[in-house]
Amino acid sequence: MSTLTSQSSAPLLTRFVDGVVYATLNRPDKRNALTDDLVVALSAECDRVADDDRVRAFVLRGAGGTFCAGGDFSGFKALMREPAPSVGLDPIARYNRQFGALLEKLAALPMPTIAVVEGAAAGGGCGLAAACDHVIMAADAHFSMPETTLGLPPAQIAPFIVARIGKTRARWLMLTGRRLSAAEALYAGLADETATPGGLNIVLQSELSRVLAAEPVAQRATKRIVADAAKRELPLVLDAAADAFAMALRSGTVTEGLVALAEKRAPSWRIAAPTTPELS
């Protein structure tokens, strides 16, 4: 089934096909730079899919051959013309923190998430990719975090870059604002695999076939366990994991999985060949 859920002029296009939500940043004339409208739209989409058990995977990409060129500074420039308030939160900080809230939602989505990076992923675009579970990158694309070269800290993306590639490597890349080729991004851990521009769709479909071969409730439980491991004490993590394991055994899905294995057939939840829309 394919369901188009957005209009072509919207800042974010979404399509639901074979259990997969494809979300496309849709400002190709601005290299998909992040505006308030785009951040709000993607945040709302994360809220929507988080509560939809039909969604088996979430794919994020950009229209027009570019993933995301980072933040659109027009909004910040308008705020910079106003003096900082004498009391209360600076509107610039509030505006910036809104993007961090989006990254939190994206990273917390309960289903597997994949970023498909073409052209450039700069600044906030790096953050969006880092918040996803898996990153597929075109061989001619590049990553960059140029904030410090512009006189800024990479405020909201920093924790997500650290979580993906580790503190030492992340710190140096962000301190220097270095631009990384696809091969360098793969080595650094910002990307998980690369493909020729013409082969991106093939690689994406291959990964989605693997995702859709696994049982979705078990996948969601796995993401919860991994998230807990980063923020809770080990005994609490293992207690919650044992509960999830027991629930899975009693749910009946394991029986289906074992019977399917014995009968040498696909389990009932598997979508063997997902239909993947052409990349923009």
Image: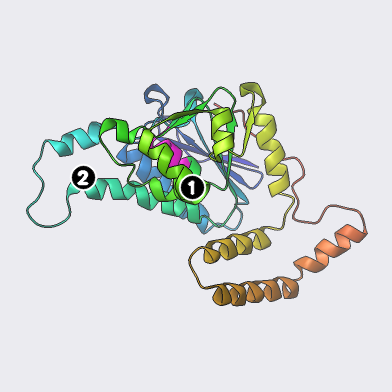
Q: Mark 1 is on which residue type?
A: Ala
Which image quadrant for residue 196? Answer: top right
Location of residue 8 in the rendering, given as x and y in whole percent from the top left corner: 45, 30
Which residue is at 30% across, 31% downward? Answer: 149
Q: Secondary structure at mark 1?
A: loop
* Mark 1 crowd level (few <14, some 14–19, many ≥20, 10 Å Cα): many
Q: Residue furthest right?
A: 263
Q: Nearer the viewer, residue 43 or 178?
A: 178
Check the image and report above or below for 74 versus 134.
above
Q: Splitting the image into 4 quarters, where does residue 154 fall?
A: top left
Sequence-first tag of 2 and 1 = 2
Q: Which residues are magenta?
A: 122-128
- Please identify the quadrant where the C terminus is shown: top right
Q: Which residue is mark 1?
A: 131
* Residue 166 or residue 97, whichever sits in front: 166
C-alpha span from label 2 to label 1: 23 Å
Q: Residue at x 74, y 55 (%)?
A: 269
Q: Position of residue 35 (x, y in %)?
A: 32, 36
Magenta segment's dominant SS is helix
* Residue count near mark 2 (Cα–Cα under 10 Å), binned few <14, some 14–19, many ≥20: some
**Residue tagged by mark 2?**
92
Q: Secondary structure at mark 2?
A: helix
Residue 114 as seen in the image, left or right of residue 175: right
Q: Amino acid at mark 2?
A: Ile
Judged left or right of residue 195, residue 160 is: left
Residue 201, x across and y down, in percent:
65, 30
